[in-house]
Amino acid sequence: MKKFIVCLGLIALLPLVPPPAAGEANLKEASPGEVNLYSYRQPFLIKPMLDEFTKRTGIRVNTVFAKKGVLEKIKATPGVADAVLTSDVGRLNDMSEAGVLLPVKSDILEKNIPVQFRHPGGLWFGLTMRARILFVSKKRVKQAEATSYEDLTKPGLRGRVCIRSGKHVYNISLIASIIAHKGEAATRIWLEGVKANLARKPGGNDRAQAKAIYSGQCDIGIGNTYYMGKMQTNRKKRAQRKWAASIRIVFPNQAGRGAHVNISGAAIIRGAKNRTNAVKLIEFLSGDFAQKFYADQNFEYPVKPGVPVSPIVKSWGDFKADTISLTTVAKHRRAASKLVDLVDFNNSTKSSNN
Ligand SMILES: [Fe+2]
């Protein structure tokens, strides 16, 4: 009884309206001379660059770091947000299809960013590049066993492949790129083949696939390049260094179309009140200082020609990237998502107990 009264007392002390969870805040109107920014990219990476931008230009940046729902926030408060930072052409494409992006013409952006990494009409701009590569067990996978995405369907790899959800934005873009090259019918056969080779139900993030290889649950996974750098150098979670040490990086399809690459990027929002400042911000992010920062802090490939990659990334060697335009890839994302459902990719009967 006493316990019950104590509980009631605690409930009475709780505020009626819970405070908003981190990342759920909305931007408020900016004053002139500022920029209002939504960022899906994390503070450790973005904040130091914004501070440097403010130091150089005097333009203050009001930033809301979000994990989801930015498109909804933009739609709910038209004219408030000026720019957005996000990863994967998929998210930028969703915003462009929703009609919330403003086309931009900038000589600096056109000079700094190669044509395949920006929207042809200036609706979005890639700021960094990453490849979607194979993580393979050093011990259990021979060099010739897996050199391409297509190899993941080989009968010899039955029960040895692991991957995050087929519906994740990174995998949808990869699948969309395969549709762009080979068509839907061939891609469906590929997805079915990968599903047949899965060691466990799709799940976890990219790093979880490296962990699964380290612990012997599977032999081959798929992940983005920068996660390898983050695992190799992780100071807080040292176990991740062991995961990374157990795998070898394979840049797929080097004898053919090249590895699927994607971007993180930026866009200006339709109705932006501080458009000029927002363009200056994206131009700054495409310049030497920010490009080097992205490369050193997050092991991404700079899009600006001539900016060096980090020593860790350099140690992986050069690779051939698929040069198909990302706008073409983005056109096939809906079909890719439908195929994932059609083959019931995420419902592999294999158990996922990791
Ligand atoms: Fe990521």
Image (spheres, grey):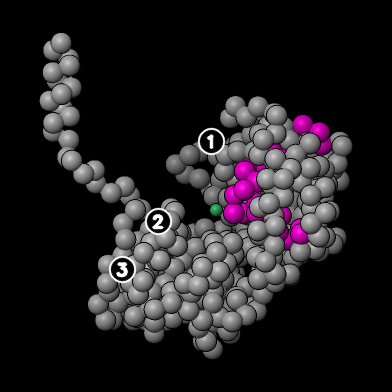
For this view, does 57 lie left or right of residue 146? Answer: left
Q: Number of labelled discs? A: 3
Asked which secondary structure carries label 2, the reply is: loop
Q: Along the line of sight, which residue is nearer the eye, 229 or 270? A: 270
Tell me which segment is drawn in magenta.
Answer: 157-179
Residue 49 at what x, y percent from top left?
40, 68
Residue 117, compared with residue 38, is above or below; it is below
Q: Is residue 178 magenta?
A: yes
Query: Which residue in the structure is indicated by mark 2?
Result: 66
Q: Which one is in front in this view, the residue at disc 3 or the one at disc 1?
A: 3
Residue under the point 49% across and 63% down: 86
Residue 232, compared with residue 65, is above or below; it is above
Residue 68 at what x, y percent from top left?
44, 54
Query: Which residue in the structure is indicated by mark 1?
Result: 239
Residue 78, compared with residue 169, is above or below; it is below
Q: Is residue 307 magenta?
A: no
Residue under the point 27% across and 74% down: 30
Labelled disc at residue 62: 3
Real-space CA distance between mark 3 and mark 2, rounded to the nearest whole angstrom: 13 Å
Q: Along the line of sight, which residue is nearer the eye, 346 or 161? A: 346
Q: Along the line of sight, which residue is nearer the eye, 56 or 264? A: 264
Q: Residues within 10 Å of mark 2 (few under 14, many from 20)?
A: some
